[in-house]
Image (cartoon, rainbow, N blue to C red):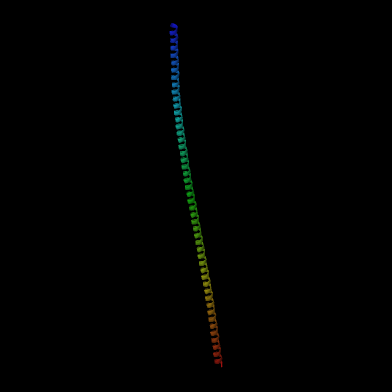
């Protein structure tokens, strides 16, 4: 009887042991499942965080790129404006120099014309003076010639009268003598 009871007790203990082992295995499995679920969630969470971090990095990279492009475009625009300003200033300077050259040429031309006019006026006055001097000389020569002719006529007249008087005196003397 004792042996049967012992056997029964052992069997009962064995059953309980098996049941406990089964329970422990079950519990372990559940824990493993929970742990596995937790790990999967953790992995998913990490993956999500990585995605967000990558998206944020990409966004930051894009913003930086856009900023660089904008900065580069602004620099280009500034350079273009500066070049246009320089070209405009150079064109103004060139136009001013051309204007100055034209003005100088016009002044020089005007001065040359003035000199030519003055030279022509001097020549005209010199010619007039020469003409007047020549006329004066001719008039003087004519006056001298007229005076000479008058003197000659007067001399001839006096000579004739003298001869006539002498002739008359001779006649008178001859008549008296006769």
Query: In the image shown, does 99 or 21 lie closer to the viewer?
Result: 21
Query: In the image shown, does 56 or 154 lie closer to the viewer?
Result: 56
Vertical placement of 48 versus 114: above or below? Answer: above
- Image location of residue 48, percent across then percent down: 45, 30
- Image location of residue 96, percent across then percent down: 48, 53
Query: In the image shown, does 145 or 78 lie closer to the viewer?
Result: 78
- Image location of residue 61, percent across then percent down: 47, 36
State the residue lying farthest toward the bottom: 178
Vertical placement of 1 versus 85: above or below? Answer: above
Query: In the image shown, does 68 or 174 lie closer to the viewer?
Result: 68
State the residue lying farthest toward the front: 1
Quadrant (top left, top right, bottom left, bottom right) of the C terminus: bottom right
Vertical placement of 55 versus 142: above or below? Answer: above
- Image location of residue 173, percent across then percent down: 55, 90
Quarter residue 141 falls in: bottom right
Vertical placement of 18 versus 99: above or below? Answer: above
Which residue lies at the image location 53% right of the left edge and 76% below the top edge? 142
């Amino acid at each position: 009887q004792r042996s049967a009871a012992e056997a029964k007790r052992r069997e009962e203990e064995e059953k309980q042991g098996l049941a406990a082992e089964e329970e422990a295995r079950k519990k372990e499995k559940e824990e493993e499942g929970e742990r596995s679920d937790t790990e999967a969630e953790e992995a998913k969470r990490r993956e999500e965080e990585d995605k967000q971090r990558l998206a944020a990095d990409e966004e930051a990279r894009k913003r930086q790129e856009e900023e660089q492009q904008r900065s580069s475009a602004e620099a280009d625009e500034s350079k273009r404006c500066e070049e246009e300003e320089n070209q405009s200033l150079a064109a103004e300077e060139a136009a001013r120099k051309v204007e100055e050259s034209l003005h100088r040429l016009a002044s020089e031309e005007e001065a040359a014309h003035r000199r030519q006019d003055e030279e022509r006026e001097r020549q005209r006055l010199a010619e007039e003076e020469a003409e007047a001097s020549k006329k004066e000389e001719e008039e003087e020569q004519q006056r001298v010639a007229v005076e000479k002719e008058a003197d000659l006529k007067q001399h001839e007249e006096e000579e004739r009268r003298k001869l006539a008087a002498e002739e008359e005196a001779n006649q008178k003397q001859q008549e008296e003598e006769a």
